[in-house]
Image (cartoon, helix red, strand yellow):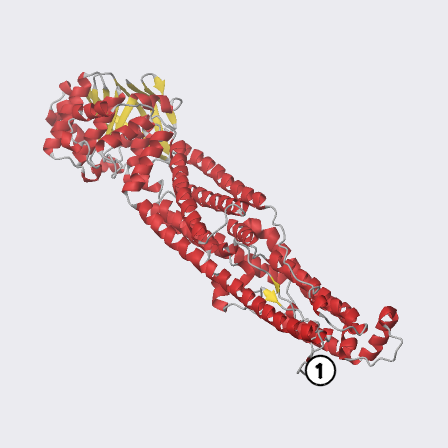
Amino acid sequence: MIITRDLTKKYGDFTALNKLNLKVNEGEIFCLLGANGAGKSTTINLLLNFITPSSGKAFINGLNVTDNARETKAFLTYIPENLMLYPTLTAIENLDYFLGIGGKNFSRKELEFFLHEAGLQQEAFHKRVQFFSKGMRQKVGIALAIAKDANVLLLDEPTSGLDPKSSNEFGELLLKMKKNGVAILMTTHDIFRAKEIGTHIGIMKQGQLKYNFSCNDKSLQEIENLYLETMSLKDNLL
Amino acid sequence: MFSYNFKYELKSLLRSKWLILLTIILLTLVLFAGYSGKKKVNKRVFDIEKANNTVKEQDITVLKVLDSIEKGFVINQNLRSLPTNPMNIGYSYPRVAAMYPLETAFISTGQSDLFTHYVQPKAYGDSFFFNHAEFSSPIQLLFGSFDLAFVIIYILPLIIIAFSYHIFSLEKENGSLKLMASQPISIYKWILQKTMLRFFVLSVIVVLVLTIAFIINNYNFVENLAEYLYFLLLTLTYILFWFTVVLLINIKVNNSAKNAVSLLAIWVFIILIIPAIIAQAANTFYPIPSRTKMITDVRALKDDVSKKQDKILDNFLRDHPEYASNKKQNYSFWHKYLASQDLVEDEVKPLIKSYETQLLKQQQWVKLWQYSSPAIILQQSFNDIAGTSTTHYQEYRTQVAKFSAKWRDFFVPLLYNNEKFSTKLYKQLPTFEYKKPKYTSLLFKASIVLIMSMFFLLITRILFYNKSKKGTIIN
């Protein structure tokens, strides 16, 4: 479960995130929309403790992220916009490295199973990832989440740059994870995908969560209108 | 965490062909440096051996002549050059006072480009004291010789920089750092392990290639194991030092291109600028009087003394009544010359001392400031191990001066007692054996480099902590 309480991040006079309150329960996909610089990635960075909050708190599975940075990371998997792995290592070696370094040891067969579950083709398991597409690399990321048995998934614009087929496959994987009780927070610009797979949508503007609603409450057109409204040039300059 | 870091970092390095390239570069450089150093050492040994062989050949001839004279044969030789005259032996048949290179000499050329390695002090003259028979080319003096010390002190840091200048920044630039930082680990420990692993890998390669160079140069590991181990220890601490600098810059700057420029600037500062400043400061604070002027002054002084030689001889005979014959004796040039030598030495001493004192002060200054740069510490230590340090050459010169006096003194009683030189006396001629000074404080010097490394690590830790708090490490 992900909870933020008045989570704020300031850089001098500039407020990157202003009193964010949100809750993502197990089995929910919360899609965070917003223009560039609206505070989406700042939220993710705060939840990962890459940066410390100026005020407010963030909790992962009930643990304060700032005080229990390492413990909370054991429960979560993070997939950035462009998931970069070690190019000279194979998919299975990358998976083994990231899991092993965090103290989780798996057999070769288990690692192959996780990659298979994440939808990676078998012939790619033992190939160096330097030639992998973005979609293939993200499947390794999902395999990492499956192997870690993570109940929190943080995704920072994971579908940007993916072709429709890969984007669709990725959406399917997220739905599968949601079904398994994972709390997913995903930042995205893809309204269509958010409406399709999300349970909740939040729209951010200038560090504030302007709208927070259930996906079933609004049509795709209404979501688009709200999103465009928050992106208006006049408001963004204010 | 460590085993996984070790396993996959090594795998990545091996697959990126970096290690193979690194090994080939290091092997080529070290072997060539070893060969270059050994070539210089062999030239030294050859020159000394040549001088020794000439002496041996002369000895055979002289002993034959002496033996014939002692057996009553008539010798067809100028009476004045007969070896029965002790001063002919003292002047024309000097011994070789050689400073044989140590087995470790090929490591570091040190001062051996400047100073002579063998002299033949005669009963007359002391020009050996000022001689620099093996002057090196000015260009070589400027850049140093291509030996193992040069490769380790100058080139190895550049290899470390090329090998690891982006050890952390590349992770950030590639994006793998965010994924790594989202794992339940300490990023500081992880990057420290990664750096130490590279230190370990490079150390293994360096130790291997150095050992190969030692083996090729027929190094006697049994007799000189301590020198070999000291050499490796100093090299490893130096490698560690540069890795800590690399890590510090990676954390501080955290941009691959800027890291490379910053590290090269640090290389220039530590290896070129600091030693240059220390040398210039030494010359400014303790200028050495002109060597040419000193030699001219000494010559003038000797001329003065020679003009008073009759008076000096009288005084000498008063001080040494055992040499004053009851019979009326015609005193030769040698009588007068040898009698004046103590006086000459006393008169010359202050002149030489003023020169030596300044030189000593310069050396003390360098000794004091050597700890400002690990490159100087290492150069001094390598010269100590190789027996090519200033201390070694000063010690050699002191020993030669003592031997020269001993050689001259050997002939004084023979001359004044009108004794003839014989085959028996030939065997009693003084010989020279160079005794190398013991090097000290090598462990201390290695510890200083180690302390410098720990200091940089501590700064890195503090910097990492501060940047983590600001959130600028990962982002």
Residue at 47% x, 67% y: name it.
B139
State the residue in front, A121 or B49.
B49
Q: Residue A188: name its quadrant.
A: top left
Residue B312: horizontal and vertical position, in percent?
Answer: 83, 75
Q: Is the residue marked by circle 1 packed among few (<14), some (14-19), or many (20+) residues within 10 Å?
A: few
| Image height of A145 relative to B104, above or below | above
In the rendered image, the residue lying farthest to the right is B326
Residue at 44% x, 33% y: name it.
B465
Q: Is residue B469 left or right of residue B389?
A: left
The residue that label 1 is drawn on is B79
Residue at 53% x, 48% y: name it.
B224
Residue B308: horizontal and vertical position, in percent?
Answer: 81, 79
Q: Is residue B188 left or right of residue B324?
A: left
Q: Is residue A175 left or right of residue A152?
A: left
**Amino acid type, callout 1:** Leu
Q: Secondary structure at mark 1?
A: helix
